[in-house]
Amino acid sequence: MKRTNTQLGRIRYLCYAAMIAAVYTVLTYVIGSFGLANGVIQLRLSEALCILPVFLPAAIPGLTVGCFLSNLLLACPWQDVVFGALATLLGAIGTRLLKKFPLLSPLPAVLSNTLIIPFVLAFVYHAEEGLPFLFLSVGLGELLSAYICGILLWSVLKKHADRLFPTRKK
């Protein structure tokens, strides 16, 4: 049976999304073994992948599912699983919307996590540090992982984007 271009495009989209989800999950799980994936001080290096919606729309569900699975595997409370995935989804959509401005495109991921995750830490994990400190600590962790590492990843990927993502829409 011959497949149509539409079917192949859907399969390719799902494959990209699944690969991104898997890489995000593995990176988060590994960094979680060092105690840096959850908690008041977070440095999820997997957040650098939040730059991928600049290149591929399939990164949006990939990152969201990856965050969801990561938080499940790390045995996070359901609120962290849901609101962490929501923060990632909002950040990924914002990143895609800013794809023409790649140096600004990591900002939605930084902002969505900085504005949502401190409430999860305060009200679900009962972090005693207070919301101002939580905004600062999550924001700094996101600046390092999603913004700085994300821009570094973008600078590498943009050189090879046509080979890595041959069917992407520019």
Image (cartoon, rainbow, N blue to C red):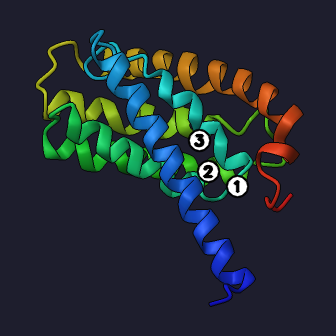
Gap between marks 3 and 1 measured at Cα: 9 Å
Q: Is residue 163 above or below residue 14?
A: above
Callout count: 3
Instruction: Quarter of the image for the C terminus: give it.
Output: bottom right
Looking at numbered disc 1 in the image, what kind of residue is underneath it? Leu
Q: List x then y, in percent, for residue 35.
A: 27, 12
- Can residue 132 be seen here? The reply is no
Q: Are the residues tagged 1 and 2 within 8 Å (C-beta)? A: yes
Looking at numbered disc 3 in the image, what kind of residue is underneath it? Pro
Q: Nearer the viewer, residue 28 or 125?
A: 28
Q: Which mark is residue 108?
A: 3
Please, which residue is most extreme toward the front here?
1
Q: Nearer the viewer, residue 142 or 135?
A: 142
Instruction: Quarter of the image for the N terminus: give it.
Output: bottom right
Helix or strand or loop: what does disc 3 sit on?
A: helix
Q: Earlier in the sequence, mark 2 or mark 3?
A: 2
Looking at numbered disc 2 in the image, what kind of residue is underneath it? Gly
Question: Image point 37% across, 42% down: which residue?
Answer: 67
Please, which residue is most extreme toward the top here?
34
Q: Nearer the viewer, residue 148 or 35?
A: 35
Q: Are the residues tagged 3 and 1 within 8 Å (C-beta)? A: yes
Q: Are the residues tagged 2 and 3 within 8 Å (C-beta)? A: yes
Is 97 left or right of 49, judged from the image as shown? right
Q: Earlier in the sequence, mark 3 or mark 1?
A: 1
List the residue tagged with mark 2: 94
Please, which residue is most extreme toward the bottom here?
1
Q: List x then y, in percent, for residue 108.
A: 59, 41
List the residue tagged with mark 1: 97
Question: Is the residue marked by circle 3 packed among few (<14), some (14-19), or many (20+) residues within 10 Å?
Answer: many
Is 86 left or right of 74, judged from the image as shown? right
- The answer to which quarter of the image holds residue 105 is top right
